[in-house]
Amino acid sequence: MAGLALLALAWAGAYAALRPLADALTYDLLRLSSDSHLGSSVNFFLYDTPKVLLLLTGIVFLMGIVRTFFSPESTRRLLGGRREGVGNVAAAGLGVVTPFCSCSAVPLFIGFVEAGVPLGVTFSFLIAAPMVNEVAIVLLFSLVGWHIAVLYVALGLGIAIISGWVIGRLGMERHVEAFVYEMAVGQLDSDERLSWVDRLHRARQAVREIVGRVWPFVVVAIAVGAGIHGYVPEDFLADVMGKGAWWTVPAAVVLGVPMYSNAAGIIPVVEALMDKGAATGTALAFMMSVIALSLPEMIILRRVLKWPLIAAFIAVVATGIVLVGYVFNLVS
Amino acid sequence: MLKIQVLGSGCANCQKLEALARQAVAGLGVEAEVQKVTDMREIMARGVMATPGLAVNDRLVSTGRVPSASEVMTLIANVLAEESPAS
């Protein structure tokens, strides 16, 4: 516990030192002018990269602790036999806090369906889990601003709830592969009893796993973003990604589906594009599409879902994202 | 002989866990067979909803994550200790 307090203190100290350190490095050590393109790009990179990595480490650790209180088994118990509507809301919320990797989407899907979780409720979970994640939240918060981060979470949950509900209403149960309904699903005998030492240990593992995986994306994406910040003229993108043309939002969503990247690789670039005149709604729609709709996940889900259901899933979620984009461009 | 099974359909984490299990067996110096279970029916029959799962002598000891090298060793050693008659 004392070690933890010490770490928290070191974390806070490092965070406070970010701005002076980045300025000293750029302007004093490298002797770059704050007015030059290179100076502003380098300063942006030197400040944002450690800031994002520090925040990421802190939040992934906290989220790692929260996740030890949930498991796919406990979530399934909470959702089993629940009515649609309430069930969709609960599933989307649980999707955020339940430990989940899209690589185990298939056993999770079978487990849920066998336990009597309605199809649409299962989808609410499967949509929210990858879309609303702590990596996206940290990057949006630290690079774009807290208001966009909050909106992303709220709208992401909204899309998961409503899309799941719509898929439930479409009555597509027959487009689930028949073997799913015939499978015998065992029960895990007991839940693990975890001590706080275990929970902290697991949170540390989550940091090592998640931050270890995404940090190269963060560094490269912030470097690209920094280049855009320094060198691309203001309002360069106002015509192509501005809010003028109606087709920009659907085009951004369509473009996002085959692009498979995690939030870490896409958000720093999108933030730079927004700075250069890309409309907020268009940028948000593009991010959501890249993160929530990915080809590899569809291929994994194809093992349990037939094509019509996969098509419906993509169509419903894409429609939701396009609507979000339009509404944003209207109000912002 | 000890039977160790890694449950999962060939994802990167499953391979990591398999390697850790082999390491642990070598480290403990016990005779064991490390198998991969990739058949979804069997995985589901065991009640594993989050891969990779780890089973020692048909007892599921971990699911949904890759435990650290030392944890894997402890998990295997625990089953060994419980199953060997007290002396």
Image: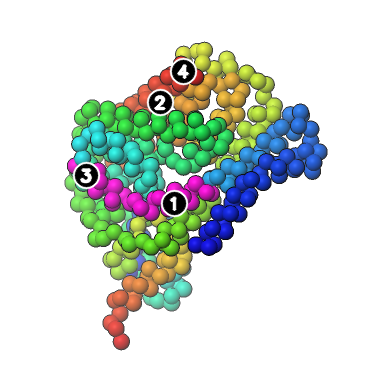
Q: How far apart, in angstroms, are the residues tagged by discs 2 and 4?
A: 16 Å
> Mark 4 to mark 3: distance in Å?
39 Å
Q: Which chain carries label 1?
A: A
Residue at the image position 71 percent from the left and 32 percent from the top: A40
Residue at horizontal 49 percent and vertical 42 percent from the top: A135
The answer to whether residue A294 is seen in the rendering is: no
Question: Of circles 4 and 3, which is in front?
Answer: 4
**Magenta segment boundaries in residue numbering:** A57-81
Q: Position of residue B51 (x, y in %)?
A: 36, 53
Amino acid at circle 3? Gly
Q: Does the residue at mark 1 contact the one at mark 3 (Cβ under 8 Å)? A: no
Residue with the mark numbered 3 = A80
- Residue A331: mark in rendering: 4
Mark before the other along the chain sequence, 4 or 3: 3
Asked if badge 2 and badge 4 are on a common chain, one would say: yes
Of residues A148 and A310, which is closer to you in this image?
A: A148
Q: What secondary structure prevails in the magenta region?
A: helix
Label ID, residue A106: none
Whether residues under marks 2 and 4 lie with C-beta atoms below 8 angstroms apart, the answer is: no
Mark 2 vs mark 3, CA separation in Å: 28 Å
- In the image, residue A10 above or below residue A215: below
Query: The disc labelled 2 sits on which kind of residue?
Result: Ile
Chain holding disc 2: A
Q: What residue type is labelled 1?
A: Gly
Magenta stretch contains residue A196: no
How many C-alpha atoms fall within 10 Å of the one at disc 3: few (<14), some, or many (≥20)? some
Q: Name the residue under label 1.
A: A64
Which structural element holds mark 3?
A: loop
Q: What's the distance in space between the residues labelled 2 and 1, CA to CA?
A: 28 Å
Q: Which of the two labelled residues, at mark 2 and mark 3, occupies the earlier sequence position?
A: 3
